[in-house]
Image (cartoon, rainbow, N blue to C red):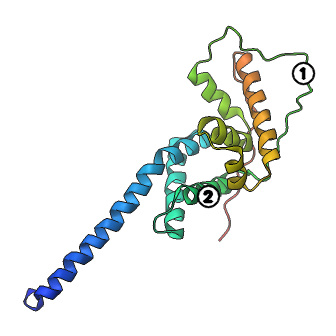
Amino acid sequence: MFNLDRLTQDNSIRVVTSRQVRQQSVDIRRDVYDSHRHRVFALAFYMTGNEVEAEEILTSTFVTAFRKADTPDSREVDSALMAELRKRFMLDRCQATLDIQAGSGERASLEGRNVRRTELEEAIHTLPADERLLFLLRDVEGYSLTAISELLTIPEAKVQRGLISARIRLRRALAKGSVVEIPAPAQAEPDAA
């Protein structure tokens, strides 16, 4: 199996060096994974509402990111995440728009009302997938409008309109005191390969 007689001083140094290089590579990949996994999982979970699906998205995201680069940066990880979310949700096709003028007589006021975290989470899940993603990226994760625009390859004005619509929907759902379900957009069908 392994002939130790042929192992010379030179060969043993190469073996040790090779192991060290391999271990460094594993450590670097682990650091990349550890530095992004919480954010990726949180976004995936809020998009799906399901831990198992969120884990699948997390895994697929990192597999894709590591295939593209040995040590992907946050931009490459985000790009892989968006690609995975596009496969699962019809983000590019779902263009739900809220008629802001409709119901302008009713004002969604949260004055004097404390909103529980669970109510907010439930309200977030009622948003259409594209608006939910915009809201999560901007208001939860703190991405700039420009970064979101570049990440999703949509104009910044469209990002702003989507955010306004998402915030109005959330405010209305929370002001009513009970979350009203908005029909979820159809899931993208997997590619037949």
The spot of residue 132 in percent (x, y) is 69, 39
Q: Nearer the viewer, residue 156 or 105?
A: 156
Q: Residue at x 66, y 60 (%)?
A: 190
**Rendered-image quadrant of the C terminus:** bottom right
Image check: 165 left or right of 145?
A: right
Give me the disc on residue 79.
Answer: 2
The spot of residue 123 in percent (x, y) is 67, 28
Nearest to N terminus: mark 1 or mark 2: 2
The image quarter containing residue 130 is: top right
The image quarter containing residue 120 is: top right
1 vs 2, front mark: 2
The answer to whether any part of residue 145 appears in the image is yes
Disc 1 residue crowd, few under 14, some 14–19, many 20+, Cα 10 Å: few
Residue type, label 1: Gly
The reply to whether the C-beta atoms of the residues labelled 1 and 2 are less than 8 Å apart is: no
Image check: 128 left or right of 117?
A: right
Q: Which residue is mark 1?
A: 103
Position of 23 relative to 12 (above/below): above
Disc 2 residue crowd, few under 14, some 14–19, many 20+, Cα 10 Å: some
Residue type, label 2: Ser
**Rendered-image quadrant of the N terminus:** bottom left
The spot of residue 103 in percent (x, y) is 90, 21
